[in-house]
Image (cartoon, rainbow, N blue to C red):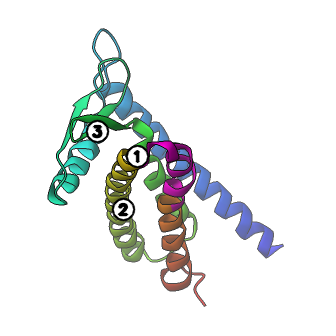
Amino acid sequence: MKKQRSIVLFLVKFFATYFILFALYSLYLQNTQQKEDVFVCSPITTSVAEQTEAVLSFLGYDAAHMQHEDEMSVKLLLNGHYTARVIEGCNSLSIIILFISFIIAFPGSIKSTLLFGLFGSLFIYGINILRIAFLTVMLYKYPDQQEFLHNLLFPAIIYGATFLLWVVWVHKFSNYKK
C-alpha cells in the first residue's frame, strides 16, 4: 500500500509541476513570438541560435544566424550555406521542464533541489548548444545523413544527458538515495 502511495504521489507531483511549467512556457511563447506578417522567434530560441553561432565561430567556422522569413525558426548558416535551423523545440526549455518536473517529483532537500535544478538546467542548456553546433557541422559535411543525425543521434545526446542527470539526482541527492 505504501509503495502504491509513493507512486501516486510521484505521478501527481511530476504532472502538476510539468503542466504548471509548460503552461508558463506556453504563455511566454504566446507573448514573445510573432507569427503575423513577419516571423519572430522567442528570445530564448534566438539566443540559442546566437550562442550556437558563437560556438561555431570560436571553433573557426564562418557561421551566421538569421530569422527565417517563411517560418518560425532561426536559420544557421555555415560558410554562407543554410545548413540547419533552430525551432522552438530546439531551445532545450521543453527538456528542462521535463528535468525539473522529475527532480521535484523525486524530492530531496530544498537546497539540493534548487541547486541541482539550476545547475542541471544550465548543463542541459549548454549541452544543447554544443549539440546544435555539432549537428550543424555534421549536416554541412554529411547532408545525406540528415535523417540519422537529426532524428536519432542528436536526440540521444540531449535525452541521454538528461537521463544521466536524473540517475545522479536519484542516487546522490533525492530522499530515495541508497
Q: Can you identify the residue that label 3 sits on?
A: 76
Q: Is tag 1's residue or tag 2's residue first in the polypeptide sequence?
A: 2
Quadrant of the image containing the C terminus? bottom right
The x and y percentages for residue 103 are 51, 66
Label of residue 127 in the image: 2
The residue type indicated by label 1 comes to: Leu
The x and y percentages for residue 23 are 47, 37
The x and y percentages for residue 49 are 27, 43
Residue with the most extreme right position = 1
Residue with the most extreme bottom position = 178
The residue type indicated by label 2 comes to: Ile
Q: Secondary structure at mark 3?
A: strand
Q: Secondary structure at mark 2?
A: helix
Q: Can you identify the residue that label 1 sits on?
A: 139
Q: CA distance from mark 1 to mark 3?
A: 11 Å
Q: Nearer the viewer, residue 109 or 85?
A: 85
178 relative to 10, above or below: below
160 relative to 131, above or below: below
Q: Residues within 10 Å of mark 1 (few under 14, many from 20)?
A: some
- Quarter of the image holding residue 50? top left
Q: CA distance from mark 3 to mark 2?
A: 17 Å
Q: Secondary structure at mark 1?
A: helix
Q: Which stretch did the figure color magenta?
A: 142-156
- Looking at the magenta stretch, what is its main secondary structure? helix
Please name which of the two marks, 1 or 3, marks the residue nearer to the observer: 1
Q: CA distance from mark 1 to mark 2?
A: 18 Å
- Is 109 situated left or right of 56 in this image? right
The residue under the point 30% across, 29% down is 41
The residue type indicated by label 3 comes to: Leu
77 relative to 55, above or below: above
